[in-house]
Image (cartoon, rainbow, N blue to C red):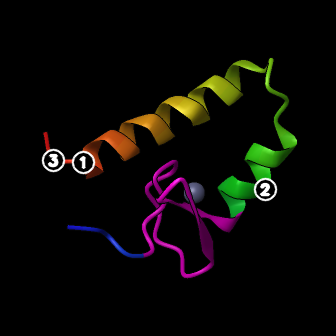
C-alpha cells in the first residue's frame, strides 16, 4: 500500500512533492537534497532514507 503524499525523508505529509525512484519526497526535502553536496554526511542520510523507503515498497 502506497501512502500518497507522505514524504519518505521527513515523514511529513505534503501535497507538493515529487517521486524520485518511486519514492515520494516533499518539496522541502527535495530542495535540501539538491543543496547538499554528495560528500556531506547529510547526503548519506538522505540516500539511506530513500533506500529504506524503496525497499519497504517491494514485498519480500
Ligand atoms: Zn520531506
Is 53 situated above or below 12?
A: above
The residue lying at 78 percent from left, 56 percent from top is: 31
- Which circle, 2 or 3, is nearer the viewer? 3
Where disc 3 sits, the SS reads: loop
Cβ of mark 1 under 8 Å from ligand 1: the answer is: no
Mark 1, residue position: 58
Q: Position of residue 14 (x, y in %)?
A: 53, 74
Is 20 situated above or below 59?
A: below
Cβ of mark 2 under 8 Å from ligand 1: the answer is: no
Q: Position of residue 28 (x, y in %)?
A: 70, 61
Q: Is residue 18 left or right of residue 53?
A: right
- Location of the C terminus by quadrant is top left
Determine contact: label 1, label 3, CB under 8 Å.
yes
Mark 2, residue position: 31
Q: Is residue 43 left or right of residue 40?
A: left
- Which circle, 2 or 1, is nearer the viewer? 1
The span picked out in magenta is 5-27
The residue lying at 69 percent from left, 27 percent from top is: 42
Amino acid at each position: 500500500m502506497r501512502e500518497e503524499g507522505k514524504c519518505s525523508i521527513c515523514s511529513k505529509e505534503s501535497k507538493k512533492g515529487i517521486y524520485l525512484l518511486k519514492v515520494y519526497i516533499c518539496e522541502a526535502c527535495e530542495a535540501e537534497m539538491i543543496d547538499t553536496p554528495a560528500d556531506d554526511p547529510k547526503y548519506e542520510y538522505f540516500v539511506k532514507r530513500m533506500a529504506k523507503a524503496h525497499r519497504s515498497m517491494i514485498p519480500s
